[in-house]
Amino acid sequence: MSGRQNTVTALLSGPDQRGLVAKMSGWIFDHGGNIIHADQHRDMEAEVFFQRIEWTPSGDQSDLEAEISEFRSFASGLDMEVECKLTTHRSRVAVFVSKYDHCFHELFLGQKSGELPCEIVCVISNHKDLEEATEGYGVPFFHIPVSKDTKAVAEQTQLAVLAEHDIELVVMARYMQILSPTFLQQFAKPVINIHHSFLPAFAGGKPYQQAHERGVKLIGATAHYATAILDDGPIIQQDVDRVSHRHTVNDLVVRGRMLERRVLADAVRWHLENRVLVYGRKTVVFD
């Protein structure tokens, strides 16, 4: 991406009012920019306006941060919340993982192929199973065991690692531990989680065994932002696959892991591309 010209993406939300689209595009035009993509949505019940704009700044790109700061001030003056990002920015990501490696490898392969515009800078795990694989990707691996008695201390160690590596996003790639409200509050940055979509049904261990015994016809995966309430954060992406009585438990597990890889990769990519706008308990995801 080094030879690519910077563009700016802005996510905006606020009270709906006349002329917002014209005002935003007018500001960009007046500052010598060129809009290359724009999309908007209006919540008819709440009368809230959402917009994503991507534009190429003027030919002089010597001080893009100043231009972004000015745009933020302009949008704030219209009672709009705004988040801006340069498209050439590669977010610094930490992967949390336990033993399952399917989502773990999907993230690294996505980074390598350029499909995920980020830099995975460290891996944190409560097990050592993926230490060698992590080192193969050239990334530091931090083994931080977690038990009921050591959870608080372990999370402080994790937070120290995240701070040391200037992490902007944590991705839970089948990390089989619950991050506490204290951890989420102190980290204060996005955390994306992936899990099967049976919840609240078939909770606990061996969900696919439970689903098979119940004769389900659909299995799925959900990626969402982690919040203090377990598995209750705003959903970013979901997908399903149809199964039948002919499928074994192992068939369900294999299909479920394929869904998890794809759904998590989609959610992370959309977040990195500044396409996801959190709105209360849900999200607006722009094309």
Image: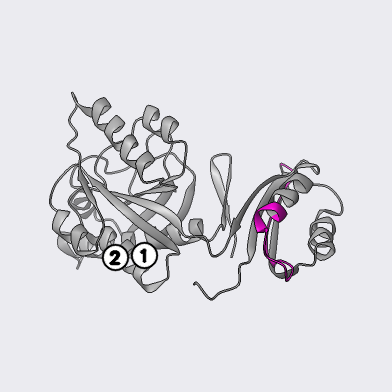
Where disc 1 sits, the SS reads helix
Q: Which amino acid does label 1 sit on?
A: Arg
User: In this view of the protein, which residue sits in the foreground, 117 or 39?
Assistant: 117
Extreme-bottom residue of the structure: 3
Residue 240 magenta-highlighted: no
Quadrant in the picture for the C terminus: bottom right
Residue type at tag 2: Met
Q: How crowded is mark 2: few (under 14 residues within 10 Å), some or many (20 or more)?
A: some
The answer to whether one can see residue 15 in this image is: no
110 vs 134, left or right, is: right
Report which residue position mark 2 lands on: 258
Badge 1 vs badge 2, beta-carbon distance below 8 Å: yes
| Residue 33 screen position, x and y as percent | 76, 67
Q: Where is residue 215 in the image (x, y as percent from the top left)?
A: 24, 55
The residue segment tinted magenta is 46-67
Residue 213 horizontal/vertical position (percent): 18, 51
**Regarding mark 2 in the picture, which secondary structure is present there?**
helix
Cα distance between the residues tagged 1 and 2: 6 Å
